Image: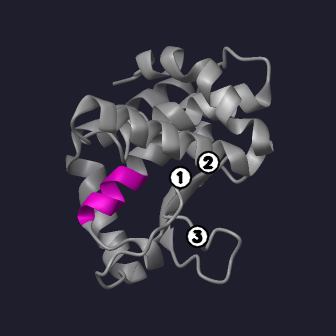
């Protein structure tokens, strides 16, 4: 998930995050579509579910949320979420990662796979409603490079460039 930039609004408690999450899971169409597709492909990629918890003091402290493939779960960092929109965008972003984990990849390099996942997750998540289109593409590019750098270092921009157009076209399952 994209790196956290603190907005001027107060943080959410774990209880508030969990309550809002429950509503989003049952009412948001993109979320319901992604969850249905994940369950159809391989529901085990979310075997431990989706939770809200504080992330301050952990290695994930700078994130709004993350998909943890090892523990097969999505964690929303309630201490970095400040609005329903934050929660929805973060959840969609992480559900795209879970969906990609459930289907077979088309890249042989792990860095290419990560870059494509970040392009897709940003395009369908936090950058989805950015207008005009060139600003949306810049948002996706910036977030994908930034997130890919964490795993792939200085080659991130080159790798994102290699997969960008193909992965922008891949909107499955939406």
- Residue 117, quarter of picture: top right
Chain-order first, disc 3 or disc 1: 1
Mark earlier in primary sequence (3, 2): 3
Read off the residue under disc 1: 1
Q: Is residue 25 above or below residue 13?
A: above
Q: Quadrant of residue 12?
A: bottom left
Q: Is residue 76 above or below residue 34?
A: below
**Residue at image coords 27%, 69%:** 83
Q: Are marks 2 and 1 in contact (CB under 8 Å)?
A: yes
Horizontal side, residue 1 vs residue 59: left or right = left
Measured along the vertical axis of the image, is residue 18 above or below residue 132? below
Q: Secondary structure at mark 1?
A: loop
| Residue 60 spot, x, y in % from top left | 64, 68
SS at badge 3: loop
Q: CA distance from mark 2 to mark 1?
A: 7 Å
Of residues 60 and 3, the one nearer the viewer is 3
The answer to whether residue 118 is visible is: yes
Labelled pair 3, 2 in contact (Cβ < 8 Å): no
Residue to which mark 2 is pinned: 147
Find the magenta span and give its range.
Answer: 84-90
Q: Which residue is mark 3?
A: 62
């Amino acid at each position: 998930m994209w790196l956290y930039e603190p907005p001027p609004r107060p943080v959410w408690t774990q209880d508030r995050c969990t309550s809002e999450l429950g509503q989003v899971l049952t009412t948001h169409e993109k979320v319901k579509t992604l969850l249905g597709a994940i369950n159809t492909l391989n529901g085990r990629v979310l075997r431990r579910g989706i939770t809200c918890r504080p992330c301050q003091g952990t290695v994930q402290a700078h994130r709004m949320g993350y998909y943890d493939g090892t523990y097969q779960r999505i964690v929303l960092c309630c201490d970095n979420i400040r609005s329903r929109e934050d929660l929805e965008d973060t959840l969609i972003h992480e559900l795209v990662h879970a969906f990609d984990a459930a289907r077979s990849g088309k890249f042989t390099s792990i860095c290419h796979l990560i870059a494509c996942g970040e392009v897709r997750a940003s395009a369908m998540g936090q950058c989805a409603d950015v207008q005009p289109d060139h600003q949306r593409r810049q948002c996706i590019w910036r977030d994908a490079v930034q997130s890919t750098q964490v795993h792939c270092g200085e080659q991130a921009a080159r790798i994102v460039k290699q997969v960008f157009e193909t992965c922008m076209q891949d909107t499955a399952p939406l």
